[in-house]
Image (cartoon, rainbow, N blue to C red):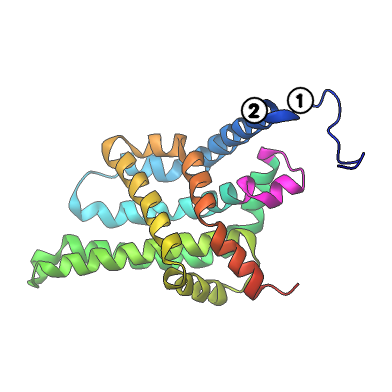
Amino acid sequence: MTASEAPVPGDPQAGPAGRATSTVYRLLVVGILLAISVAPTVVLSFLIAPHPSNVPLVVASALFVGPGLSAALFALGERARDDGLAPAGAFLKGYRMNVGDVLKLWVPGVAVLAALTWTTVNIAVAGVPAWWAGILLGLAAVVVLWLVQATVITSFFAFRGRDTARLALYFLGRLPRVTLAVLSVLVLAGAVVFLTTPAVLAVFGALLVALLLRWEKPLLSEVRLRFVES
């Protein structure tokens, strides 16, 4: 270790305890900002009447989740730490930098999800076999996985929208372990919402984002290695 790399005496972040405290603080701040950014989705989920016909409206309200998720991913990523950005500053920078690109993907993605859920809840009226509901739900799960992968890529790389869309779809099959890990995170998030309320998920969302980011490291590494010019 060189003199410039040696820890500064008295540095509160030196040592395991200091790093742990810094990590907890970053998670806490990012969690609060994430909860604020997805508050419209939480509020709308309470205001919309709990009726099967309103499920597409609840799905459509999830549009606010995309930019918040991207900002949280950026704030918890290595780039923000390497740049020495404070948690709040990193979150706001990630939000401003990626909101446009994220919405370009989330608007059509959420529209497709709303259409799939509307068709599913009205499948009996349509007079088609009930097993079609399983196919529609499977398609919805693929769309959600694709949205998450696309958001992760957008949070750290500046590709064109259609290129990000293709990469996200490509990596669903290219890295099946990552896809399964992401699916497990989504199942956990769904279980939290089902057993409690969306507000609880918003409060503890930063922990799930950190878990998601950990599992997405192979994807980010491969994107950087294969698709980013050095």
Residue 34 visible in image: yes
The amino acid type found where label 2 is placed reads: Thr
- Judging by the rendered image, the residue that carries numbered circle 1 is 12
Q: In the displayed image of the protein, which residue is found farthest to the right?
A: 3
Secondary structure mainly formed by the magenta segment: helix
Gap between marks 1 and 2 measured at Cα? 9 Å
Above or below, 180 relative to 15: below
Q: Position of residue 190 (x, y in %)?
A: 32, 46
62 sits to left or right of 96: left
- Identify the residue shown where x is 63% and y is 30%: 20
| Image point (35%, 68%), residue name | 112
Pointer 2 residue: 21
Q: Is residue 110 visible?
A: no
Name which residue lies at 59% across and 68% down: 222
Residue range corresponding to the magenta coloring: 74-88
Q: Which residue of the protein is positioned furthest toward the front in this rendering?
A: 1
User: Is residue 86 magenta-colored?
Assistant: yes
User: What kind of element bears circle 1?
Assistant: loop
